[in-house]
Image (spheres, grey):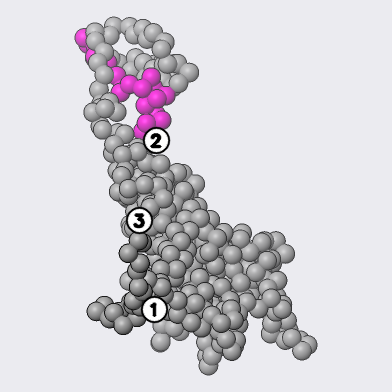
Amino acid sequence: MFDFLKRKKEKSSGAYSGAAYLSGGTASWAPRDYDNFAKEAYLKNIVAYRCIDMIAKSVSTCPWYLMIDGTDGPIQNDNDDFNLLLKRPNPFQSWQSFVYNVISYLLLSGNSFISRVGLSSGTNKGKVRELYCHRPTQISIKKNDATNKITSYVYQQSASIIKQYDIDPITYQCDMLQIKSFNPLDDIWGLAAVEPAAREIDTNNAATDWNKGLLENQARPGMLLMFERNLSDMQLNRLQKDVRDGREGAKNAGLTMILEGAKDAKPYGFSPTEMDFIEGNRDKARMIASAFGVPAQLLGIRGDSTFANFEQARQIFWEDTVIYYLNLFKNEMNQWLFYNDDSKYIDYDLDDIPALAYKQDQKWKRANESQFIKVNEKREMVGLDPVDDGDVILIQASMIPLGDDSVVEEFPVEDNE
């Protein structure tokens, strides 16, 4: 069980052994147990794992481009060296894998930490050449006790590898970026999406463990053995050992149990039907999915019909959850990487996302049916280049102003016609 509300995070881990000796203020440690979050939610609970995996995969599969502000509006910049980072941010990862890690850590801990490596000399001094995403447990934050502001980030990969990233007191720039979610009780560390769902995840895990134990015991509740007389300590210990070692577990299911002097044996406890196990487990699964912003219908949870169809659920998932994380990642990266160049920025493209194809269809239909805008304006709405003689408004030839018959020409009609 999590039990994170009752105990503080232990600081005896070797990952932090040397960080506290670096100067520059007081070290601030993560107030929640990230290891427990990862173990109980991501490694043991299929619903929480699937929610985190779906969000991270959706964000990481979007194509990203480097954009620059031109005279005619933003255009894609394919000639900048920064495009190499959008393919391989470091020698060990692709851009998709990098973004997947950033979003996964953000959901599990409420914080994602990214460091950049730039050229230290030459004409391109300062240009970013590598980006790395770090596990939150490898980072400690140092702050000024008087102002409660962050002064530096300390990265510790091992007992011997420690690096401190100081924040410039004037520009507030740093080679370490912290992307965090809102936390109403902490100004330094973000709130993990796992934490509000912790009790539901614990309950769901406990129900799964109980069900597994029940199946290993012939899918029946425990047995209450009754004897006519009291048993001695030796007899009781021998009976308990015989029952536990030779009768319990899946390998002993169905074996006949013979007990000396037993008068009666009755089952005790509740059956899965009496505990309403199946529906209760589904209800907890829905609550866990709701905490992450994932429609339960996308997880295959039976009995959930919140949306009319699967496609509608996918649309809501992208519009309410995925696009939020896309914008958060985009804006945080842009203000960090291009703080001294407002003309450059990275952006994502949703045109090829199947779940949002209906939006493109609606845009084309709206542009095609509009009767009050020019042809080139319609083309601009759907992302097409303007054409010659396109600055005109086309209307249907049969349409005339109401009450105006001056445009109607009278023609003589022959009698035989």
Position of residue 360 measured from the top left corner of the image (x, y, whole percent): 47, 63
Q: In the figure, 381 relative to 352: above or below?
A: below
Q: Secondary structure at mark 3?
A: helix
Which-is-in-front pick, marks 2 and 3?
Answer: 3
Q: Residues within 10 Å of mark 3 (few under 14, many from 20)?
A: some
Residue at the spot of label 1 = 372
Please indicate whether residue 1 sits to the left or right of residue 351 in the image.
left
Would residue 213 be counted in the magenta stretch?
yes
Q: Secondary structure at mark 1?
A: loop
Query: Looking at the image, do the residues carrying marks 2 and 3 touch, with CB atoms under 8 Å apart?
Result: no
Position of residue 110 measured from the top left corner of the image (x, y, whole percent): 44, 65
Which-is-in-front pick, marks 1 and 3?
Answer: 1
Q: Looking at the picture, tell me which residue is in the foreground, 296 or 149.
A: 296
Position of residue 70 measured from the top left corner of the image (x, y, whole percent): 60, 86
Would residue 348 be counted in the magenta stretch?
no
Q: Looking at the picture, tell me which residue is in the foreground, 400 or 286.
A: 400
x 53%, y 64%: residue: 351
x 36%, y 33%: residue: 210
Q: Amino acid at mark 2?
A: Asp
Report whether residue 387 is seen: yes
The mark that comes first in sequence, 1 or 3, is 3
Point out which mark residue 327 bears: none
Which-is-in-front pick, marks 1 and 2?
Answer: 1
Q: Amino acid at mark 1?
A: Phe
Give me the C-alpha separation between circle 1 and circle 2. Answer: 64 Å
Residue at the spot of label 3 = 291
Give me the C-alpha separation between circle 1 and circle 3. Answer: 45 Å
The mark that comes first in sequence, 2 or 3, is 2
Question: Where does the magenta region start and end?
Answer: 210-230
Point out which mark residue 209 bears: 2
